[in-house]
């Protein structure tokens, strides 16, 4: 599973020997994983196996928890994200994140989408409008909100709010979008809209999505990683994982024998 140096060039992320502890409790154990460009990677596994910990490590958001300690390397385009040259702010601009619960700001729809670009110094109103429209179209929300851009984001439904959060992430043109159970708080129709959106997203982005929903992983992802108790048990093409898994534990999990 460990990749060689030459291989690392083809990966957006090349995770090598990653271990992570919360205090004395080890939550990730020797994770090795290469994530390729313009693919959707699904992370599955039972509650507490380390899925959220893993994705939050990829943009160093995990560091907001003081008791966390890591070992190993995560190469982002060949550069160690824990290295002293890594600019965390730049990493987080290039690697956006969407959370389980939609978390719009208590501002207008427009202000939510252009929040990132404004922070990056874009002031021109016309440019901001263009970014907003493009991002909202990308998140399949434009038609529903184009006439209500100045309304508060909280006036949107949960599914719309989640698509707004995806638009807000896209507005700074990230390369990678991390999603931690983005549809678990949504109804089936809203979930389906986000799933439809995923096909489009991967044309432009590399997407890493945590999901508890096995059908969702099977439907939308190119590769699937199965975590169990902090270990990466199996990582392969999604078809393979769901039709002919290598490891008995993967098979037990996907067939619903535990978890
Ligand atoms: N802030 C924290 N402080 C201490 N331990 C934590 C913290 N966050 C997570 N853990 C522990 O790390 C392990 C992995 O948790 P994590 O949240 O990554 O699991 P998960 O796979 O995302 O689970 P779920 O499917 O329930 O979201 C668990 O044992 C959890 O108790
Ligand atoms: Mg989680």
Image (cartoon, rainbow, N blue to C red):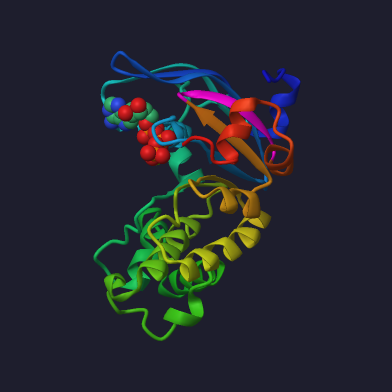
- Position of residue 104 relative to residue 149, above or below, is above
Q: Quadrant of the N terminus?
A: top right
**Residue 224 in which image quadrant:** top right
Q: Position of residue 170 (x, y in %)?
A: 50, 58
> Farthest residue in the front direction?
257
Q: Position of residue 38 (x, y in %)?
A: 67, 48
Residue at the spot 41% in from the left edge and 67% down from the top edge: 159
Q: Position of residue 244 (x, y in %)?
A: 74, 36
Which is more toward the observer, 91 or 73? 73
Seen in the image, is 125 located left or right of residue 33?
Answer: left
Image location of residue 204, percent across then percent down: 64, 55
The verdict on residue 232 being magenta is yes
Magenta segment includes 125: no
Residue shown at 73% from the left, 44% from the top? 239
Number of marks: 0
Q: Quadrant of residue 163?
A: bottom left
Residue range (magenta)? 229-237
119 or 58: nearer the viewer: 58
Q: Nearer the viewer, residue 258 or 203?
A: 258
Is 145 positioned to the left or the right of 75 in the image? left
Q: Is residue 125 above or below residue 204?
A: below
The residue depicted at 50 percent of the width and 46 percent of the height is: 211
């Amino acid at each position: 599973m460990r990749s060689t140096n030459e291989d690392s060039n083809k990966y957006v992320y090349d995770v090598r020997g990653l271990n992570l502890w919360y205090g004395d409790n080890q939550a990730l154990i020797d994770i090795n994983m290469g994530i390729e460009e313009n693919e959707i990677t699904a992370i599955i596994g039972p509650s507490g196996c380390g899925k959220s910990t893993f994705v939050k490590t990829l943009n160093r958001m995990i560091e907001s928890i003081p008791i966390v300690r890591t070992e190993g390397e995560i190469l982002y385009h060949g550069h160690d994200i824990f290295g002293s040259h890594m600019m965390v702010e730049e990493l987080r601009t290039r690697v956006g994140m969407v959370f389980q619960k939609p978390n719009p700001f208590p501002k207008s729809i427009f202000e939510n989408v252009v929040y990132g670009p404004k922070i990056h110094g874009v002031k021109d109103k016309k440019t901001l409008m263009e970014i907003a429209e493009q991002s909202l179209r990308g998140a399949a929300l434009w038609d529903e909100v184009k006439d209500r851009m100045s309304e508060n984001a909280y006036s949107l439904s949960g599914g719309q709010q989640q698509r707004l959060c995806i638009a807000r992430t896209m507005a700074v043109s990230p390369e990678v979008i991390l999603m931690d159970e983005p549809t678990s708080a949504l109804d089936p129709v809203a979930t389906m809209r986000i799933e439809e959106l995923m096909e489009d997203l991967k044309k432009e982005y590399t997407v890493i999505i945590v999901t508890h929903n096995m059908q969702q992983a099977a439907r939308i992802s190119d590769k699937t990683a199965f975590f169990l108790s902090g270990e990466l048990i199996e990582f392969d093409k999604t078809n393979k994982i769901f039709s002919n898994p290598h490891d008995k534990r993967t098979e037990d999990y996907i067939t619903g024998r535990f978890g």
